[in-house]
Image (spheres, rainbow, N blue to C red):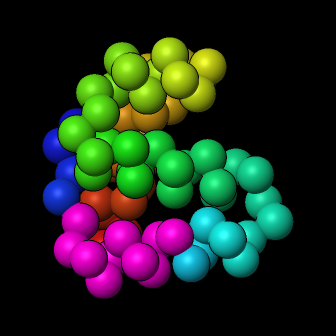
Amino acid sequence: MKIKLTAEQRANLKTQYKMTDDQRICDSIYDVLLADDSWSATLITESQLIHETTVLRHSKDYLENT
């Protein structure tokens, strides 16, 4: 799933990433940031050792909540 973040959105996600203690939220944020860096869902899956549907869900959830 293609995601394009503004500089402000990217900075907000990085701040949220640094401030949260919940590893699930961190993983979700990291997946969105990688997608913004033009990583494919397959590459993110391989780097994070998670299922591809999880990566797609993280992207979908982010897009629905922005």
**Whether residue 45 can be seen here:** yes
Q: Give the quadrant of residue 21.
A: bottom right
Is residue 14 depicted above or below 39 in this figure?
below
Q: Position of residue 54 (x, y in %)?
A: 50, 31
Q: Position of residue 61 (x, y in %)?
A: 40, 54
Is residue 39 depicted above or below 25 in this figure?
above
Is residue 9 one of those drawn in magenta? yes
Total marks placed: 0
Q: Give the quadrant of residue 63.
A: bottom left
Kindly identify the residue that appears in the image at 36 percent across and 71 percent down: 10
Kindly identify the residue that appears in the image at 71 percent across and 77 percent down: 19
Q: Give the quadrant of residue 66.
A: bottom left
Kindly identify the residue that appears in the image at 65 percent across and 57 percent down: 25
**Whether residue 53 can be seen here:** no
In the image, taking residue 7 as reference, residue 18 lies left or right, namely right
The stretch of residues the image draws in magenta is 5-14
Q: Position of residue 13 (x, y in %)?
A: 47, 71
Q: Position of residue 62 (x, y in %)?
A: 38, 59
In the image, taking residue 6 as reference, residue 21 lies left or right, namely right
In the image, taking residue 39 as reference, residue 23 lies left or right, namely right
Q: Main secondary structure of the magenta part?
A: helix
Is residue 18 one of those drawn in magenta? no
Is residue 46 depicted above or below 11 in this figure?
above
Quadrant showing the N terminus: top left
The foreground one among 61 and 11 is: 11
